Amino acid sequence: MRIGIDARVLAGTPTGVARYLSALIEHLPTSVKREDVLELFADRPLPSGTPATVLRWPLPGGDPAWRQFRLGAHLIRPRVDVLFCPFYTIPLVARVPTVVVIHDVSFAARPEWFSAKARVAFALVGPSARRARRIITVSEFSAGEIVRRLGVRRERIHVIPPGLDPRWLRPVVAEERRAAREWLGFAGPYALHLGAVTARRNLDLVVRAFSRVMLEARLVVVGPAVPPAPDVDELAREGGIADRVIRRAWAQETILRGLLAEAAVLVYLSEYEGFGLPALEALAVGTPVLALRRASLPEVLGDVAAWVETADPGEIGAQLDGLMRGGSLAGRLAREGPHRAALFDPYVAAERTWSVVRDAAR
């Protein structure tokens, strides 16, 4: 069987979806390695050197235009037996069976969180879900939302949580910690917010809560701003803690484990997540997570998190300060985190995913 993969997400700056797809390819089950051929499609050579069929797209429109017009035109003729699309949409004109991964439908639940350009791109998700032969999503929460928001029958959806790369469960060595500290430029205690800065992740609430935390600590916010995103620097100035916030737009993969392991706590007050991979990675390295009890996060974290029930900065600040000072709760979360994270096996995720893809071809 020849399996095509829309791999454009692997060609740019690494994102959560890129890491998701990389893990599925890296942990291919033996049956796929032995019996099938994978063909990756991208708009430029992949930086990892992984072989790919490069379909150039010099015109405007970015990712949606490339997928619909360039990849779609290439697959009008049935060059593969099935196409796997890990990023929400499929090329609607492609004449091959398709499997699409819809990680969440926040764009439908709360369109005000997205720019006009993003809303136009996400408008193709509904037609993609209805046309695809199979749909994969990453949590039961997202499955329910896809049914409710996109009008898809539940029996068409396969819930397959992503696996965690086994490297995350290895002890974080001194060199990793030192590299993260050097990159950060700060040697004291810090709370970390990791991931794209978006309207749904309550950075205003995080900043207001952090103003109640011990003075020697810092709030580290790492991730690109995705419009209409809050201005973290402006929020910090308004909250009177501009000198206590460290802002970075991006962290390379090589320092992520050290950055998470050195944090006293990961703050993840997101209103809406399909899965929440940074929170799971924090558990893996033994860093306590303070999370808003919303969406998929209870599925992922179980009872191995400090839960926020209401958007009260005073209450959240008290919880945050307590976790940063250590104590019994922080100790329990640090001990139990790696065991919880180990439940998300990448080989199981890959086996189940490629089984759905191969079944769609039949």
Image (cartoon, grey):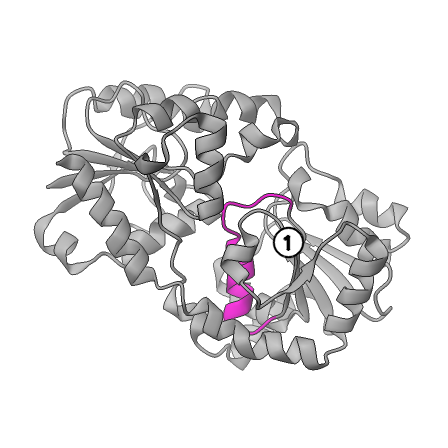
* x and y, in percent, of residue 205 in the image: 78, 49
Q: Quadrant of the C terminus?
A: top left
Which residue is depicted at the point 21% across and 24% down? Answer: 75
Task: Name which residue type carries label 1.
Answer: Arg
Q: Position of residue 15 (x, y in %)?
A: 48, 47
Asked whether residue 342 is drawn in magenta, I would say no
285 and 323: which is toward the camera: 323
Q: Is residue 284 above or below residue 7?
A: below
Q: Quadrant of residue 346?
A: bottom left
Left or right placement of residue 209 versus residue 198 in this view: right
In the image, residue 201 lies at what x, y percent? 66, 45
* Residue range of the region highlighted in magenta in the rendering: 271-287
- Residue at 19%, 34% (x, y): give it: 82
Q: Kindly indicate the quadrant of the structure image that contains residue 359.
A: top left
Q: Residue at x 31, y 20 (%)?
A: 92
- 101 relative to 308, above or below: above
Which of these two is toward me, 338 or 7? 338
Q: Which residue is mark 1?
A: 293
User: Could you tell me which quadrant the N terminus lies in?
Assistant: top left
In-image side of 35 versus 343 (left or right): left
- Circle 1 crowding by C-alpha within 10 Å: few under 14, some 14–19, many from 20: many
Q: Position of residue 187 (x, y in %)?
A: 72, 74
